[in-house]
Image: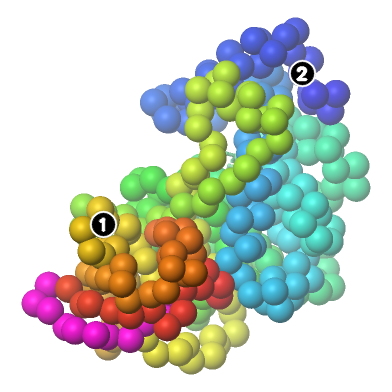
Amino acid sequence: MPHLLHEFASEADLVKAVGELSKAFTTDRGNIQKYLSDPRLVSAYTAFYLTTNIPKLEAVLSWLTPDYRAEILQHELIDVGAGPGTFSVAWKELGGGDGVMLETSQLMRDQAARLLPKARFTLAELVKPRLLLFGHSLNEMGVEAGLKYVSEAKPAHVWLIEPGTKEVFALALEFRRRMIRDGWQVRYPCLGMGECPMNGTEDWCHQYVHVRHDPEVERLTQLAQRDRRLLPLTVLMFEREPIAKRDENLARIVRTLPATKFSHEWEVCREEKGLKLERFQLPFKSYPKSEKKAVEALLAGSLIQFETDKQMVDSRRIRLIKEDNSE
Ligand SMILES: C[S@@+](CC[C@H](N)C(=O)[O-])C[C@H]1O[C@@H](n2cnc3c(N)ncnc32)[C@H](O)[C@@H]1O
């Protein structure tokens, strides 16, 4: 609280401002830019979304193998549409180094400078490999502006961590198409570079993370009546370098379906002469009790390695070789 631009008179005052903000993000998107010129709302954004997004980055990094995660954190972070520095603060907290924030709102930059006194706001010469991140910002700036940042910053990696909504998925798909056309490889979530099979379906590809907050932050989320413990998000990771060939029999869970009496049911996306959606069925009795917890923790976004037990007309009965969230 002492680092915010605006001093809230009380907790109730802050909760009210958080309510106004979430209205702007959901029902009143035509006026979305308004909050950026109001110190009170910028401060409320910081108190609420900065704190709840830090565990979000932590959860996304936990999907990576320890070696890959360590390698990723060596990169200079180019935090595009950084707002109050949400992901830059998280990056440092989680072991990453200094980075750059590219942000058009002066108030957001002022707020970020209060949180990260060494903050830099312009791209300097390339000294080490960069990871360019759009954190809840591509959906505000649009695909063209996003691609322009990518071509200017010359990063080795580009990540999107955006809200898990249908509208954002449409934008992410367009961004993915354009990035692939420009020679980028998709590391996550897609297991191939072909057309997305969810394009045009009723459903959309998004992931979930379970996050835990400090008690103070948890209290704020409850007062604001915003559940921030199970967060839907749209994550995409791109790499400039070619990605090594992946193991066969990998599948990405894109939707967990209601379990039957004897099996888990999932919709998955996998590569077989192009990307395709399939229904998988994992019988409870096919894995030992010791793996129950890990299997139940699988969510949309998780990666599994499987063997086929039986191919049925509209689904595939499988056995798990490995249930693993890591890339
Ligand atoms: C919802 S906030 C996200 C802030 C932060 N990344 C986060 O996740 O908490 C979106 C930010 O994108 C910024 N933004 C919008 N268009 C932009 C552009 N063309 N260039 C840089 N920043 C932009 C806005 O000013 C705003 O601060």
Snapshot quadrant of residue 29:
top left
Q: Mark 2: give few (<14), some (14-19) or many (20+) Cα within 10 Å.
A: some
Q: In this view, does 272 lie to the left or right of 305?
A: left
Magenta segment range? 302-314
Q: Is residue 7 visible?
A: yes
Residue 246 vertical placement versus 89 (above, below): below
Viewer-nearest residue: 175 or 295: 295
Mark 2 CB within 8 Å of ligand 1: no
According to the picture, the residue beneath numbered tag 2 turns out to be 6
Q: Which of marks 1 and 2 is nearer the N terminus?
A: 2
Find residue 32 and report its horizontal and vertical position in percent: 50, 30
Viewer-nearest residue: 175 or 116: 116
Q: In which quarter of the image is the C terminus?
A: bottom right
> Are the residues at dot 1 and dot 2 in contact (C-beta closer than 8 Å)?
no
Find residue 122 and report its horizontal and vertical position in percent: 79, 53
Q: Residue at x 72, y 9 (%)?
A: 10
Viewer-nearest residue: 215 or 79: 215
Identify the secondary structure beneath mark 2: loop
Identify the secondary structure beneath mark 1: loop
Q: Quadrant of ligand 1?
A: top right
According to the picture, the residue beneath numbered tag 1 turns out to be 259
Q: Which residue is drawn at 53% across and 62% down?
A: 147
Q: Residue at x 58, y 13 (%)?
A: 16
Q: Is 291 part of what is drawn in magenta?
A: no
Snapshot quadrant of residue 71:
bottom right
Viewer-nearest residue: 283 or 124: 283
Q: Is residue 311 left or right of residue 294?
A: left
Q: Residue 283 carries which label?
A: none
Question: Which residue of the protein is positioned furthest toward the front in this rendering?
Answer: 289
Q: Given the image, on which type of amino acid does mark 1 rest?
A: Ala
Q: Given the image, on which type of amino acid does mark 2 rest?
A: His
CA gap between label 1 and label 2 equals 48 Å
